[in-house]
């Protein structure tokens, strides 16, 4: 890298730049910026939806800022509309998982020879198999999650460990035959579209449909060559793809994106919906975007509707500052894993007490994460919220290493696995 002059990070907001497993865990975007700094090179971060950290750095003049307020080549921004799914449900106009507005728009686009992209960030057919009599739900034997039904395999599958099993004809708990599928994923959307639009060529783009690079390239080529009329996909369809004939983009459920219990859910929601909306419309026509939601008054939806990143940033950055989250604090997440929950609780108690004695209120938790058991291992987490660019960072690092070393040297805790994640996504 001695002659390095420029490092370009395209779509710098993308969460996939964070290396998670296996270790070492690092933010690739930040590593690229630091690499450029080490060799006196320039770093260029490109995106239509900047991460809050990067835009905050630009607002503080730590980074330079170059803006493109209009689409390249004078292409018009798409018309974006939020469709009230709750109102259509009350009026009995909701057809399974499609509002009548979205179905009509799909039909019009197909009649005009345009292609359609539908976004649903959940693969499989249905995420829940539940008994209507006793409430039993099909769950993974090794993870604390429901098994997802995949119709084309006719199997229940865990999306964490890969465990698969058959679909019971009756409830294993009470013997009732009232076992029902709840919720919907990309497979079910594809299935329903074939009923409404039997003449259309429909294709999925998700982890199940794209298990090899050849399959991915084939779908992209088929869509570019207009051999596919409707493309149904997970966040794969938001990844900067450029198709000139897309007249309509539909977001099937904005609520699922925005209600995730994480401080970044608003940021992720704005980015995902704005990016997928960007697939609509190209040189010769203005595209249309329909976003289905039950809570249409959500502030992020208003900001997506208006294409107003600045308002989104101002509101979100105020919340981050009020609750002391990045970029105003550095986060370190500690996760402990063990097959015995009692051993895990005792080990985490030892570590947490040591950390709280040295860092006080900067330590949050410990607590059980949303998925508290994966691959037979129980999980506990705690979070360190630390002031950036202060001696407390070095102190926290030393204290964390000492606490983990003490834990592993304590009889009975040697097999407890510790995962330290700095700046977690």
Image (cartoon, helix red, strand yellow):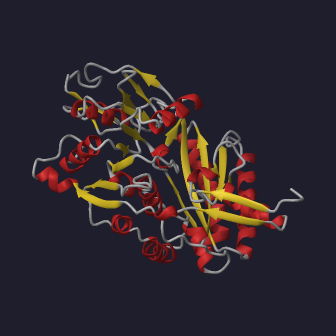
In this picture, residue 175 sits left or right of residue 19: left
- Residue sitting at x 40%, y 53%: 280
Query: Which residue, as the protein is rendered here, is positioned at the far front?
Result: 284
Q: Can the viewer see residue 260? A: no
Q: Nearer the viewer, residue 256 or 169?
A: 256
Image coordinates of residue 274 in percent, x first then y, are 43, 59
In this picture, residue 208 sits left or right of residue 213: left
| 326, above or below 149, in the image | below
| 223, above or below 272, in the image | above
Image coordinates of residue 154 in percent, x first then y, are 36, 21
In this picture, residue 11 sits left or right of residue 69: right
Image coordinates of residue 197 in percent, x first then y, are 24, 33
Q: Nearer the viewer, residue 362 or 330?
A: 330
The N terminus - image quarter: bottom right
- Residue sitting at x 20%, y 40%: 96
Image-quadrant location for residue 302: bottom left
Q: Nearer the viewer, residue 147 or 200?
A: 200
Query: Which residue, as the protein is rendered here, is positioned at the far left?
Result: 91
Image coordinates of residue 67 in percent, x first then y, are 56, 72
The C terminus - image quarter: bottom right
Query: Which residue, as the protein is rendered here, is positioned at the far bottom?
Result: 60
In this picture, residue 135 sits left or right of residue 227: left
Q: Nearer the viewer, residue 344 or 41?
A: 41
Q: Can the viewer see residue 317? A: yes
- Residue sitting at x 43%, y 63%: 266
Tally the marks.
Answer: 0
- Residue sitting at x 23%, y 24%: 174
Query: Which residue, as the protein is rendered here, is positioned at the far right?
Result: 2
């Amino acid at each position: 890298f001695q002659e390095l002059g420029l490092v370009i990070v395209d779509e710098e907001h993308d969460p996939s730049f964070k290396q998670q497993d296996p270790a070492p865990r690092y933010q690739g975007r930040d590593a690229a910026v630091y690499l450029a700094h080490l060799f006196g090179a320039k770093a260029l971060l490109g995106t239509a939806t900047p991460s809050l950290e990067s835009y905050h750095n630009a607002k503080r003049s730590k980074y330079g800022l170059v803006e493109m307020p209009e689409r390249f080549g004078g292409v018009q921004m798409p018309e974006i509309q939020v469709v009230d799914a709750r109102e259509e449900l009350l009026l009995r106009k909701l057809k399974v998982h499609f509002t009548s507005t979205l179905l009509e728009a799909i039909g019009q686009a197909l009649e005009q020879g345009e292609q359609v992209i539908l976004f649903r960030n959940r693969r499989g057919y249905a995420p829940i198999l539940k008994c209507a009599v006793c409430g039993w739900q099909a769950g993974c034997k090794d993870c604390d999650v429901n098994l997802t039904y995949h119709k084309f395999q006719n199997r229940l599958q865990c999306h964490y460990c890969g465990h698969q099993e058959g679909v019971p004809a009756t409830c294993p708990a009470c013997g009732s035959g009232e076992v029902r599928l709840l919720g919907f994923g990309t497979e079910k959307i594809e299935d329903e579209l074939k009923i409404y639009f039997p003449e259309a060529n429909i294709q999925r783009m998700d982890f199940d449909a794209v298990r090899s690079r050849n399959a991915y390239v084939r779908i992209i080529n088929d869509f570019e060559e207009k051999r596919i009329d409707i493309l149904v996909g997970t966040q794969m369809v938001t990844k900067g793809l450029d198709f000139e004939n897309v007249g309509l983009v539909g977001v099937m459920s904005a609520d699922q994106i925005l209600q995730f219990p994480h401080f970044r859910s608003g940021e992720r929601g704005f980015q995902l919906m704005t990016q997928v909306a960007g697939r609509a419309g190209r040189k010769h026509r203005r595209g249309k975007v329909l976003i289905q939601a039950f809570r249409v008054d959500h502030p992020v939806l208003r900001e997506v509707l208006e294409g107003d990143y600045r308002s989104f940033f101002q509101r979100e950055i105020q919340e981050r500052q009020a609750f002391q989250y990045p970029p105003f604090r550095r986060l370190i997440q500690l996760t402990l894993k063990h097959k015995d929950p009692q051993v895990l609780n005792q080990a985490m108690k030892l570590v947490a007490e040591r950390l709280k004695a040295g860092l006080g209120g900067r330590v949050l938790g410990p607590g059980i994460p949303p998925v508290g058991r994966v691959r037979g291992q129980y999980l506990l987490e705690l979070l360190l919220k630390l002031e950036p660019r202060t001696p407390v960072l070095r102190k926290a690092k030393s204290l964390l290493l000492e606490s983990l070393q003490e834990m592993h040297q304590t009889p009975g805790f040697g097999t407890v696995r510790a995962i330290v994640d700095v700046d977690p996504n």
